[in-house]
Amino acid sequence: MKKTIERALRKIKAGEKPDTFYARFFFDAAEPFFAGHFPEKPLLPGFMQIEMAKIAFEKYSKTQCEIAEIMRAKFSGQAFPDIEIELFGQYQKDGEAIVLSADIKSANNKISTIRMRLGVAGCRGYY
């Protein structure tokens, strides 16, 4: 799954405000997971959207992290293959952890809002 998400990551850059970043993804319809989710109407699974946010932060911050807690995951739209998906992330230090919030959209349609706490073991070098 990680390699699939890394392959789909097309661009990542700093946001306009401190502690923010943007990422763009493109998942090819030929990716095997689309065949099972769902065959007649392929959708990007929610768990992959959560991993997209984590991996985008890791690439942006050049560190490795672990998800310690999913604080919120709201899936309000659908993410289809062969369409660019945008992620806006913002993060902040919270004690020994990092809290990452991500809004994911496609063609200006909101797909999901995710908020998670990333464990300190892998992120310690970042802060």
Image (tube, helix red, strand yellow):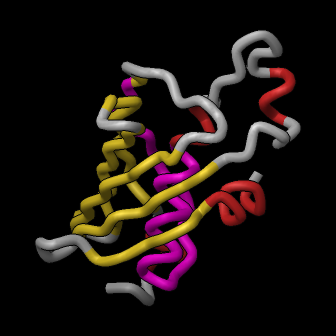
Q: Is residue 8 left or right of residue 87?
A: right
Which is nearer the eye, 127 or 90?
90
Residue 2 in sight: yes
Which is nearer the eye, 97 or 83?
83
Q: Percent from the top left, x then y, of residue 74?
A: 37, 25
Residue 71 in sight: no
Above or below: residue 24 compared with residue 120? above
Identify the residue at the far top of this view: 40
The quadrant of the rendering that contains the C terminus is: bottom left
Question: Which picture quadrant has residue 71?
Answer: top left
Tell me what residue is drawn at x 30 percent, y 36 percent: 108
Tell me what residue is drawn at x 34 percent, y 64 percent: 22
User: How many numbered circles does the render carry?
Assistant: 0
Tell me what residue is drawn at x 64 percent, y 24 percent: 43
Q: Is residue 36 left or right of residue 119?
A: right
Magenta stretch: give its range. 50-74
Q: Percent from the top left, x then y, of residue 79?
A: 53, 30
Q: Is residue 40 left or right of residue 120?
A: right
Question: Which picture quadrant has residue 103?
Answer: top left
Q: Percent from the top left, x then y, of residue 68?
A: 49, 52
Tell me what residue is drawn at x 54 percent, y 76 percent: 122
Q: Percent from the top left, x then y, of residue 41?
A: 70, 14
Which is nearer the eye, 70 or 111?
111
